[in-house]
């Protein structure tokens, strides 16, 4: 009976060695994955920081000298290009044209 116990113990030890080896391999894989993930996160953070420093627009409040009305411009800091205007230029021109047409009518009637 003691031989069976020894055989059982040695096979159990062999299984434990294999289990330890598998566990060690899995732990190494997880460690490599974590390192790769951290590196990926660093790269993404770096890209976002570069992107923000390059393309961060500025917001400018402008007063139209002809109408006295204010509007907003979103401008690229580096090129000075107007990216967006609120209200758009077309809406400002239309409002100006309407004031020219309606203005004399209102002044005459009043």
Image: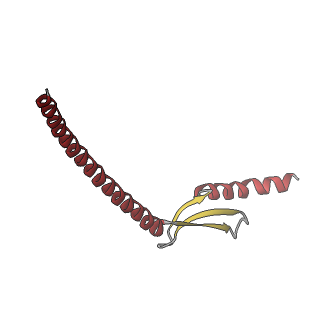
Identity of the residue drawn at 16% across and 30% down: 5
The quadrant of the rendering that contains the N terminus is top left
Front residue of 65 and 99: 65
The picture places residue 60, in percent across and down from the top left corner, at: 62, 67
Please give left or right for residue 43 compared with residue 1 in the image.
right
Tell me what residue is drawn at x 51 percent, y 66 percent: 56
Q: Which scheme is used to colour this image of the protein?
A: secondary structure
Q: Position of residue 106 (x, y in %)?
A: 82, 53
Q: How many marks?
A: 0
Asked if residue 83 lies left or right of residue 69, the reply is left
| Residue 72 placement (x, y as % from top left) | 63, 62
Apparent side of residue 22 relative to residue 95 in the rendered image (left or right): left
Q: Is residue 54 above or below residue 103?
A: below
Whole-percent x, y for residue 52 in the image: 47, 65
Is residue 99 toward the left or the right of residue 43 in the image? Answer: right
Q: Residue furthest right?
A: 110
Name the residue at the top extreme: 1
Of residues 28 and 48, the one drawn nearer to the viewer in this rendering:
28
At x 58%, y 56%, the residue is: 90
């Amino acid at each position: 009976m003691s031989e069976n116990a020894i055989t059982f113990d040695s096979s159990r030890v062999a299984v434990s060695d294999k289990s330890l080896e598998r566990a060690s391999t899995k732990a190494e894989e997880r460690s490599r994955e974590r390192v790769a993930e951290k590196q990926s996160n660093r790269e993404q953070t770096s890209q976002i920081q570069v992107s923000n420093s390059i393309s961060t627009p500025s917001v400018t409040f402008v007063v139209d000298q002809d109408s006295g009305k204010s509007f907003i411009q979103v401008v690229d800091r580096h090129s000075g290009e107007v990216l967006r205007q609120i209200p758009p230029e077309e809406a400002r021109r239309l409002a100006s044209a309407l004031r020219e047409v309606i203005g004399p009518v209102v002044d005459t009637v009043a």
